């Protein structure tokens, strides 16, 4: 019987500017997003009846018996394609910390949609973006899974051409933060957007470009998780060219010129802060990238 595994990469907001608020309360943002080779994994397999199970270091923080976004994704896709959807066993390998600003739940939902689309042989050209948006504002970008700029509440997506893989360290103090709470603590909701991106050809050029940008959610997040300051300083002490919070936090990322630099920074951080979640890897370049790290 067919088994399908789909990687659910961590979503990294290289910058996130909050530019307004809709009448329904959702915030308008402009964000540059890349996806890491660090993430969860979703396995799906045809079964006699629906099942959902969990494993991995952060599985204990979720409850398979309670509402999970993966199960909601399954049910929504089945409702949209009732004639071809069959019972399915879904297993989620939860490697990313929960409620941590790197899109874990959104990535899991997007990976589930992709895996189930393959298992149920839903036509590849069926547009799942609307369905993804109903699952969460970040799910459409996770479905795209490539370097991109997102606007609106996150659903207006423009893919970025030819971005090279980007070495990165993720660090989280294992303080879960609530996204609505962080948004509600924003002092200003009408900040300037991000400039047009023409072409960014190398690591140093990207860093220069990003240095002028910011994550508007970092300040409110620091009022709930003051460790964010410590993490960013620790990433910089370990040689990061840029350190910043992702999403609504509390995960911060450091960007490094090479994978070796990122790996030794991660070892240093883990030694200094043994209780933190720390991972090194690379943000994945666009499909037509050469596979070489930025120089
Ligand atoms: O869409 P999602 O369920 O991931 O969003 C969680 C919460 O985060 C929303 O209910 C909203 O309070 C907040 N949010 C927001 N603006 C966004 C995305 C999320 O205010 N663009």
Image: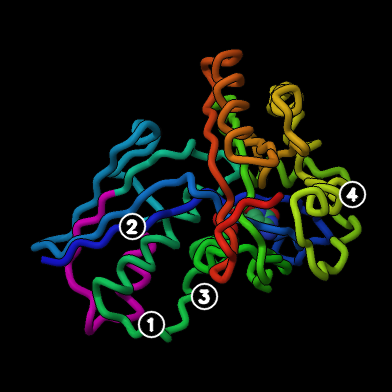
**Quadrant showing the N terminus:** bottom left
Q: Are marks 1 and 2 in contact (CB under 8 Å)?
A: no
Give the mark nearer the N terminus: 1 vs 4.
1
Which residue lies under the disc numbered 4?
212
Magenta-tinted stretch:
71-91
What residue appears at the point 78 percent right and 40 percent down from the top-left corner? 185
Which residue lies under the disc numbered 1?
124
Residue 286 shows up from this direction: yes
What residue appears at the point 91 percent right and 59 percent down from the top-left corner? 192
Give the mark nearer the N terminus: 2 vs 3.
2
Secondary-structure class at tag 2: helix
Which residue lies under the disc numbered 2?
71
Give the mark nearer the N terminus: 3 vs 1.
1
Q: How is the image coloured?
A: rainbow
Q: Are marks 2 and 4 in contact (CB under 8 Å)?
A: no
CA distance for labels 2 and 4: 40 Å
Does the magenta run of residues contain 76? yes
Neighbour tally class for label 2: few under 14, some 14-19, many 20 plus, Cα within 10 Å: some
Residue 7, by quadrant, is bottom left
Which residue lies under the disc numbered 3?
129
Residue 157 shows up from this direction: no
Residue 145, image x, y percentages:
53, 63
Give the mark nearer the N terminus: 4 vs 3.
3
Q: Find residue 294 and name its label.
A: none
Secondary-structure class at tag 3: helix
Residue 24, by quadrant, is bottom right
Residue 260, image x, y percentages:
58, 34
Secondary-structure class at tag 4: loop
Q: Nearer the viewer, residue 38 or 120?
A: 38
Asked whether, in this view, residue 183 is left or right of residue 1, the answer is right
């Amino acid at each position: 019987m067919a088994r399908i595994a789909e990687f659910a990469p961590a979503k990294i907001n290289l910058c996130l500017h909050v530019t307004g608020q809709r009448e329904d309360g959702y915030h308008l943002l402009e964000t540059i997003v890349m996806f890491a080779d660090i993430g969860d994994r979703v396995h799906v397999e045809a079964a006699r009846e629906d099942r959902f199970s969990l494993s991995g270091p952060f599985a204990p923080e979720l409850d398979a018996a309670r509402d999970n976004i993966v199960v909601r994704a399954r049910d929504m896709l089945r409702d949209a394609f009732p004639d071809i959807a069959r019972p399915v066993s879904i297993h989620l390998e939860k490697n990313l910390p929960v409620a941590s600003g790197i899109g874990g739940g959104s990535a899991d939902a997007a990976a589930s949609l992709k895996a189930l689309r393959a298992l149920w042989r839903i036509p590849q050209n069926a547009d799942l973006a609307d369905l993804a948006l109903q699952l969460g504002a970040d799910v459409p970008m996770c479905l795209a899974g490539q370097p991109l700029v997102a606007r609106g509440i996150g659903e207006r997506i423009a893919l970025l051409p030819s971005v090279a893989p980007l070495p990165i360290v993720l660090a989280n103090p294992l303080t879960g933060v609530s996204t609505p709470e962080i948004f509600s603590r924003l002092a200003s909701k009408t900040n300037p957007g991000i400039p047009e991106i023409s072409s960014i050809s190398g690591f140093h050029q990207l860093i220069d470009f990003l240095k002028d940008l910011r994550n508007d959610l970092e300040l409110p997040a620091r009022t709930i998780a003051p460790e964010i300051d410590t993490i960013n300083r620790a990433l910089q002490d370990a040689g990061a060219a840029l350190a910043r919070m992702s999403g609504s936090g509390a995960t911060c990322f450091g960007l490094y010129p090479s994978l070796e630099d990122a790996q030794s920074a991660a070892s240093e951080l883990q030694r200094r802060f043994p209780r933190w979640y720390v991972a090194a890897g690379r943000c994945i370049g666009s499909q037509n990238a050469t596979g070489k790290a930025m120089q």
